[in-house]
Image (spheres, coloured by chain):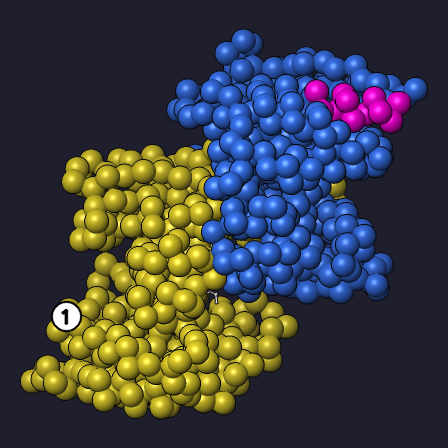
Chain colours: A yellow, B blue
């Protein structure tokens, strides 16, 4: 039987609740395929700040690096909002992404037939949406230098950041995006702001260069402002989207809300080699933390992505995906996706129902 | 009788058609209030590139500067898409904004009762949306230096830009936003990415400092990724939004699409003093240019903003706004906002109907 080491990073807010559910589902689905796990739980984010004074303790990063995959809950909360930048929970997450060198963030946004009513978009617009945002995750303005605070030549205080991409950073994310598009409908839309930004002109140039390696994939380009509109106007026009770190942050959240069920959406962050990082798209939801109200399905589906993209265990992944669909078809809903005629359940009960369906 | 000089910049694509309609409406509405105009038409964007080799000829900028207000159609088109940055039509627009120092871009997004069906959002979500995005327009990553292309310490080619804000740039846009919010419902939401970017941390600090001058306005802060989601989830939660140049570009376009009728939405760009710049939010739509299909109402409503914000002529502005609503109530629709049961008209005929309603 196969054995993998998984680092669990519950984090803050609803993180521990959803990680607990997802871990149980992961264990059961994998065991049915003869897979076993060693789990190691480590602190990150606000939880790590409280216990160690740092948002990403060295032990957490080195445990994560030595494991086969990392499953993260959520990080952040009001309590640490006023912290200085290097002591913000979010900084721990950014350090983790950088430390694991997971430059490719895959964020599917799918409108499930069972949940089409959850979208604020009209049924005919939302129905059938199935897109994948491939977001660059370890470069751009998130990590660019110089950055900070200073005083300019007029004696004015300033705050500044640098949006910067090197050729190899664009090339590698473009390849992931082309590979992804190839496995899907063969359409890739690269989003930038090349009518204004040099970083985007360069992005477009490199993506276009890499396109020659993928003659079977149809590449188009779109400005980010237009993409933000088109996602609302007609999300079905998109299949795979590739974009930089900050535009990907914005557009993937917008796309996730178009599905109406951000509590359902997983993500995978992958590097060239080494363990991938898997986490739900949603945040730590401090307002409902510890109340057994959170929707664990985004984390459960992140565990499925962990199996598929992180370990290459497609069959176990499919078991989880099928179990989630089955549970929804049986009418179980957490509050965020509840609609009349269904059964309202909490985080734990949702987990139990998914286990029954595995 | 009062007399003003207006610079008309038709620009590219559908620009000339919509400017022609808007100018006629502007003339008539103003004349009923005893206002007369001297119009001077100048080239900008692709049209200026073709005739002078520059996207913003010096004559155009100086004419604009010496007038009381500037009305712009649209700029850009496939023809000039491959031009180098300094020869892009868009660069002409950026130079115009910078030259006129119009740092405050007001972009209303209103769902008119007559057009609620045009939105892709469900009726109960779209109905009643009435928000104003106040976008910083002459700073941030659009204009920040250093910028360009280079080679990094590893010998890799790079493309880069600088996101930078000085205190006075944030202070002045914040004041415009607080004043705007004060005249509306008294709620201001400042959008940034202060959990990651120093430029945003500084933005939030300055906006918070300026808030003390406006104790009657309720200030909140939101991360840009969350704002992109919330606009889809529940746009009615927003009244006035203030944000930087690039986030404003993205969010105002998203907000405009939420109304379902980007062909309806005007904008005003204002400085401390000097003429304002008024333009529709939509682009040059090269695919329908010259076909008498464009919706001129965004430009007509931009002319109303010109009267109100540019010249302080509220009564004449109200005449235009009322005429547009009346024309819609009488069932006239261009293709972009057409729904069954209404009368489909072209750009010119829409203009004639609005003139009847003035
Ligand atoms: C928490 C924050 C730093 C993070 C980001 O901006 O990347 C989050 O919004 C995300 O998208 O994963
Ligand atoms: C045409 C382009 C340069 C411009 C911008 O990005 O500001 C446009 O998108 C806008 O929003 O007015």
- Residue A10, given in percent of the width and then of the height, sits at 39, 82
Residue A11 image-quadrant placement: bottom left
Please state the horizontal and vertical placement of residue B187, each as a whole percent of the image. Answer: 73, 61
Q: Could you tell me which chain the residue with mark 1 belongs to?
A: A
- Which residue of the protein is positioned furthest toward the front in this rendering? B341
Disc 1 designates what residue? A314
* B63 sits left or right of B335 in the view: right
Q: Residue A325: give x, y in percent of width and height.
A: 26, 75
Q: Which residues are magenta?
A: B24-34
Q: Position of residue B212 (x, y in %)?
A: 82, 62
Image check: B30 left or right of B20?
right
Is B122 included in the stretch rendered in magenta?
no
Residue in the image at 50% along x and 26% along y:
B293
Instruction: Check the picture and name the quadrant holding the N terminus of chain A.
Output: bottom left
Please tell me which residue lies in front, A276 or A284. A284
Asked if residue B207 is positioned above or below residue A299 in the image, the reply reads: above
Q: Does the magenta segment cover residue B33?
A: yes
In this view, the residue farthest toward the top is: B51
What is the magenta segment's predominant secondary structure? helix
């Amino acid at each position: 039987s196969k054995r993998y080491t998984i680092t669990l990073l519950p984090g803050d807010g609803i993180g521990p609740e959803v990680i607990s559910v997802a871990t149980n589902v992961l264990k059961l689905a994998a065991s049915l395929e003869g897979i076993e796990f060693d789990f190691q739980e480590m602190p990150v984010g606000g939880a790590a700040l409280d216990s160690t004074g740092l948002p990403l303790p060295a032990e957490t990063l080195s445990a994560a690096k030595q494991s086969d995959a990392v499953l993260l809950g959520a990080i952040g909360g009001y309590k640490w909002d006023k912290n200085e930048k290097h002591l913000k929970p979010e900084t721990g997450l950014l350090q983790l992404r950088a430390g694991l060198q997971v430059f490719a963030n895959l964020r599917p946004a799918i409108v499930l037939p069972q949940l089409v009513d959850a979208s604020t978009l009209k049924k005919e617009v939302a129905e059938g949406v199935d897109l994948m945002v491939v977001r660059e995750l370890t470069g751009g303005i998130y990590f660019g230098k110089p950055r900070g605070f200073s005083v300019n030549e007029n004696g004015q205080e300033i705050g500044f950041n640098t949006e910067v991409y090197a050729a190899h950073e664009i090339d590698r994310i473009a390849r992931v995006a082309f590979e992804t598009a190839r496995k899907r409908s063969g359409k890739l839309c690269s989003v930038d702001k090349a009518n204004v930004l040099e970083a985007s002109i360069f992005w477009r140039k490199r993506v276009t260069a890499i396109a020659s390696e993928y003659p079977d994939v149809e590449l188009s380009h779109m400005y980010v402002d237009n993409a933000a509109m088109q996602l609302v106007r007609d999300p079905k026009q998109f299949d795979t989207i590739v974009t930089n770190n900050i535009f990907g942050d914005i557009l993937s959240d917008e796309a996730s809300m178009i599905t109406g069920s951000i509590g359902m959406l997983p993500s995978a962050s992958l590097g060239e080699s080494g363990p991938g990082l898997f986490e739900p798209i949603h945040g730590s939801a401090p307002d409902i933390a510890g109340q057994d109200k959170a929707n664990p399905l985004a984390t459960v589906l992140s565990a499925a992505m962990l199996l598929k993209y992180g370990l290459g265990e497609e069959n176990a992944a499919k078991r989880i995906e099928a179990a989630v669909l089955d549970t929804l078809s049986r009418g179980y809903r957490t509050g965020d996706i509840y609609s009349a005629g269904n059964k309202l359940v909490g985080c734990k009960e949702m987990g139990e129902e998914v286990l029954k369906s595995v």
